[in-house]
Image: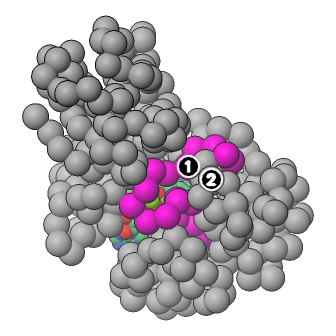
């Protein structure tokens, strides 16, 4: 049985023993272990079935701590930390020698973030090491935004989930790296490009599907439900031409009228992209549990968090119009 509790001391005790604990963050739940304990980190890779070339995010307790782990902080990176930490921003920076290779997959950089969740911040205060924590889901599948999602994946193999309720932001952090001190977005996420650019000015995005991705969240097939998923330009039109299938729909604001649709998830009837992002994964988890033949979705507005939602949906879809 997995212990589900808010007991920080118990979580700290397990982490001190080299065990893993799923922790709440404002973005998604993470599968956490002590960065300095090799066995713990290897357990993360094993449990997630994550390729070893795919480095982990290091969660630290405050922006002040950053200088203990990285060897150089570009001026713009300091501005971003001041503006957004604790929060849904991960920064990739040159690492110090003592950050183990098993956390960074041998890279000379480390991805750092101060998560914005009271329980996890309290936990980080309580222990004396940072936590490596990838999203608490098997590699390639939908990230968890609730305790139930974590348990669905890891019920039999995990000692404890620190119960922090539902993730407020609901989509992973935005990842930024620096090349010649210039910020570059490696993964679109819960912090919008617009908010970042208010601090940095225009930033480049390298969020493509490359063969050797900077951030494997960039791999084409990622964040996927088991049920086949299609992105349609017009949901109603697309459904008209389909044979009799059990269909689920994931849409931004409007319901589609069709007897073929068994279940619909409407993410924000009022058209709020932050609300839509917060509900995205829970909706996908629900749709994926209904044994449907097909999930149909649409493109969201290409601005603010709509960009991040489209990125995730694009990777989750098996086909497009
Ligand atoms: O919101 C989040 O970021 C969540 C919560 C738990 O903090 N974590 C998360 O972790 O999404 P994960 O492992 O699913 O995604 C981490 C991403 C991966 O795509 C990984 O490749 C990238 O961060 N990453 C880690 N270290 C890196 C590095 N040194 N250089 C480039 N990318 C790196
Ligand atoms: Mg992930």
**Residue 20, percent from left and from top:** 70, 72
The main secondary structure of the magenta stretch is loop
Residue occupying image coordinates x 81% and y 53%: 4
Q: Which residue is mark 1?
A: 144
Q: Which mark is residue 152?
A: 2
Viewer-proximal residue among 290 and 23? 290
Judge whether residue 32 is colored magenta.
Answer: no
Instruction: Tell me if 126 is positioned left or right of 28 in this view.
Output: right
Which of the image's four quarters has the N terminus? bottom right
Q: Measured along the vertical axis of the image, is residue 253 above or below residue 45?
A: above
Residue occupying image coordinates x 30% and y 45%: 228
Q: Can you tell me which quadrant of the image ligand 2 is in? A: bottom left
Instruction: Tell me if 191 is positioned left or right of 301 in this view.
Output: right
Q: Is residue 184 visible?
A: no
Which of the image's four quarters has the C terminus? top left
Magenta residues (range)? 124-148
**Residue 250, percent from left and from top:** 36, 27
Q: Measured along the vertical axis of the image, is residue 127 above or below residue 122?
A: below
Viewer-proximal residue among 183 and 74? 183
C-beta proximity under 8 Å, tags 1 and 2? yes
Judge whether residue 143 is colored magenta.
Answer: yes
- What is the C-alpha distance between the residues marked 1 and 2? 9 Å
Circle 2: element type: helix
């Amino acid at each position: 049985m997995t212990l589900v509790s808010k007991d920080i001391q118990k979580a700290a005790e397990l982490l001190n023993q080299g065990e893993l604990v799923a922790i709440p963050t404002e973005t998604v739940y993470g599968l956490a272990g002590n960065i300095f304990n090799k066995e713990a980190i290897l357990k993360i890779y094993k449990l997630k079935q994550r390729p070893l070339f795919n480095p982990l995010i290091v969660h630290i307790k405050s922006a002040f701590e950053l200088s203990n782990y990285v060897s150089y902080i570009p001026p713009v990176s300091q501005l971003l930390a001041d503006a957004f930490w604790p929060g849904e921003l991960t920064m990739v920076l040159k690492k110090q020698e003592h950050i183990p290779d098993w956390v960074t997959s041998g890279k000379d950089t480390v991805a750092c973030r101060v998560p914005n969740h009271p329980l996890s911040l309290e936990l980080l205060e309580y222990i004396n090491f940072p936590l490596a924590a990838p999203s608490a889901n098997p590699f390639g599948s939908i990230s968890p935004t609730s305790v139930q999602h974590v348990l669905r994946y890891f019920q039999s193999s995990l000692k404890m989930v620190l119960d922090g309720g539902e993730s407020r932001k609901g989509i992973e952090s935005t990842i930024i790296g620096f090349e010649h001190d210039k910020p570059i977005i490696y993964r679109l996420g819960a912090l919008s490009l617009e908010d970042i650019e208010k601090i940095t000015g225009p930033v480049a995005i390298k969020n493509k599907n490359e063969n050797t991705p900077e951030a494997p969240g960039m791999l084409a097939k990622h964040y996927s439900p088991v049920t086949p998923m299609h992105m349609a330009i017009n949901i109603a039109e697309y459904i008209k031409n389909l044979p009799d299938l059990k269909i689920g729909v994931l849409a931004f604001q409007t319901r589609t009228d069709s007897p073929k649709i068994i279940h619909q998830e409407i993410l924000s009837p009022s058209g709020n992209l932050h609300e839509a992002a917060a509900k995205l994964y829970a909706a996908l988890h629900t749709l994926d549990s209904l044994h449907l033949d097909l999930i149909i979705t649409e493109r969201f507005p290409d601005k603010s968090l709509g960009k991040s939602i489209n990125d995730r949906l694009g990777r989750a879809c098996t086909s497009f119009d």
